[in-house]
Amino acid sequence: MFTILDALLSPESVRRKIVRRILLKIPGLQSGMTIDERIVHALTPRPHYAYCMLNGARLAKRLGFRRTSIIEFGVAGGAGLVAAETLSTLIEHETGIGLDIYGFDMGSGLPAAKDYRDMPYHWKSGYFCMDEAALRAKLRKSKLVLGPIADTVPQMLLQDRFRDAPISSIFFDVDLYSSTMDAFHVFEAPADTRLPRVFCYMDDIVGELERHSDFTGVLGAITAFNEAHGQAKISRLHLGEMPDQRLRASRLMMLHDFAHPMYSTFVGDEQRESELRL
Ligand SMILES: C[S@@+](CC[C@H](N)C(=O)[O-])C[C@H]1O[C@@H](n2cnc3c(N)ncnc32)[C@H](O)[C@@H]1O
């Protein structure tokens, strides 16, 4: 029966938020939940970051690595990096894999649009300017790499550290088509700087009436990357229905690097095969 309370708690997202808040307040309840359950029900900071970081660390482990790297492109005030640091403690404990975190940003906010694909009708240069000193004071372990990512990404990827801790997750949040294309150069570095599949969170691809098309902005950059690369594709994760909108499959994607030497390395569960034989 549809009650007054049901009407008050509509739409569905409002109900979920309230249930989540109630769950969070029950002492000890979360301690009985797995980390996957906590992420799916958005009981961690930034569940979309958590999903990528956890599953990226698990993939690194299955492939025999002891450390892995996480990148956020577009840091601004640093809320995302701070969340990633909080999550890293949880995920290192869960997986036994060490997590290195990098944040790439201009420092001075959004650069000027280069053409219509940067959607100058929506974004303005200087948006999201960083207070570097305030941010550095908040960070515990992340490495902040400042400058245009067209310059900083190639420089960083020459460093050996990524070979011991290949990249497993990237959060793309640089808003512009041109900046997202610059960030995608991370996938053109030697294969040993990354895992064969990299979990990606793509911001700014859904919502708000007139903002998104497959040919401009972040979606346009994904289309262009996929057209330009025969042996590597950025594809949506097909996760099915997720309670939290940030976890919906449309924003969670994965780089598939088909030519990576480890692409076909088995990372499944040996147990499953023997179960099927019974
Ligand atoms: C929306 S903000 C990032 C917000 C942040 N991820 C968070 O969750 O709080 C976008 C950032 O991208 C950065 N950015 C955009 N284009 C860039 C480029 N080409 N090089 C470096 N940084 C860039 C801007 O400086 C800006 O701080």
Image: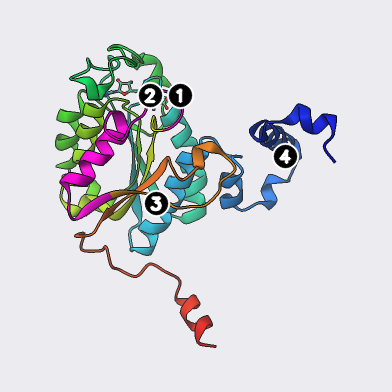
SS label for mark 4: helix
For the C terminus, the image quarter is bottom right
Between 88 and 167, the one lying in front of the other is 167
Given the image, on which type of amino acid does mark 1 rest? Glu
Counting residues from the start of the chain, the first of labels 4 and 1 encountered is: 4
Residues shaded magenta:
206-233
Counting residues from the start of the chain, the first of labels 1 and 3 encountered is: 3
Verify CB contact (< 8 Å) between mark 2 and mark 3.
Answer: no
Using the numbered discs, state the Cα–Cα distance from disc 3 to disc 4 in whole angstroms.
27 Å
Between 17 and 221, the one lying in front of the other is 221
Local packing at callout 3 (Cα closer than 10 Å; few below 14, some 14-19, many 20+) is many
Verify CB contact (< 8 Å) between mark 2 and mark 1.
Answer: yes
Using the numbered discs, state the Cα–Cα distance from disc 2 to disc 1 in whole angstroms.
6 Å
Q: Which residue is mark 4?
A: 23
Residue 207 lies in the magenta-colored region = yes
Image x and y of residue 110, in percent: 28, 17
Image x and y of residue 86, in percent: 50, 36
SS label for mark 1: loop
Given the image, on which type of amino acid does mark 2 rest? Arg
User: What is the number of the mark on residue 208?
Assistant: 1
Query: Residue drawn at (52%, 52%), measured in percent from left and top?
Result: 240
Counting residues from the start of the chain, the first of labels 2 and 4 encountered is: 4
Q: Which residue is mark 2?
A: 211
Q: Which residue is mark 3?
A: 56
Local packing at callout 1 (Cα closer than 10 Å; few below 14, some 14-19, many 20+) is few
Q: Tell me if 105 is positioned left or right of 237 in this view.
A: left
SS label for mark 2: loop
Query: Residue drawn at (15%, 50%), measured in percent from left and top?
Result: 190
